[in-house]
Amino acid sequence: YAGCLDAAMRKDVPDLDAALAKGDTSPATGWLREKVQSHGGLREPGETIEHACGFAPSTGPLLDYLEAKFGAIYQL
C-alpha cells in the first residue's frame, strides 16, 4: 500500500519534497490524517487505500518508485 499512498500524496501535495527537506512533516501527516487515519477503522484496508488514493491498490506505484530511485543509482 505504501507505493499507492506515496503516489497519491505526491499528486495531492506537490511541494511535499520541499517541505520534508525543511523538516516539515505537517503536509504529509495532514494528508495521512485526512485521507487514511480518519477512515481506517471504518473500512477494510484495501477499501481505505482505494478511497484515499482514488484507485485500487496495485503494485504499479511501488514499482515506479523503486525504478526511479534505484534506476538512477544502478543505471537501470
Image (cartoon, helix red, strand yellow):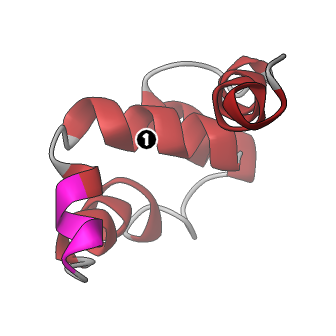
Q: Residue at x 64, y 26 (%)?
A: 68
The residue under the point 20% across, 44% down is 13
Residue in the foreground of this view, choosing between 36 and 16 = 16
**Vertical side of 31 occupied by 47: above or below:** above
**Location of residue 27 with respect to 49 vertically, above or below:** below
- By secondary structure, the bulk of the magenta-drawn segment is best described as helix
User: Quick check: can you spot residue 59?
Assistant: yes
Which residue matches tag 1? Answer: 52
Residue 32 placement (x, y as % from top left): 38, 63
The residue under the point 34% across, 38% down is: 10
Query: Relative to residue 33, is residue 2 depicted above or below?
Result: above
- 42 on left or right of 24: right
Q: Which of 32 and 46 is in front in this view?
A: 32
Please state the extent of the stretch shown in magenta in the rendering: 18-22
Image quadrant where one finds the N terminus: top right
Numbered circles on residues, count: 1
State the image coordinates of residue 62 (x, y, percent, origin top left).
73, 33
The image quarter containing residue 69 is top right
- Side (left or right) of 20 relative to 51: left
- Check disc 1: other Cα within 10 Å, few if <14, some if 14-19, many if 20+: many
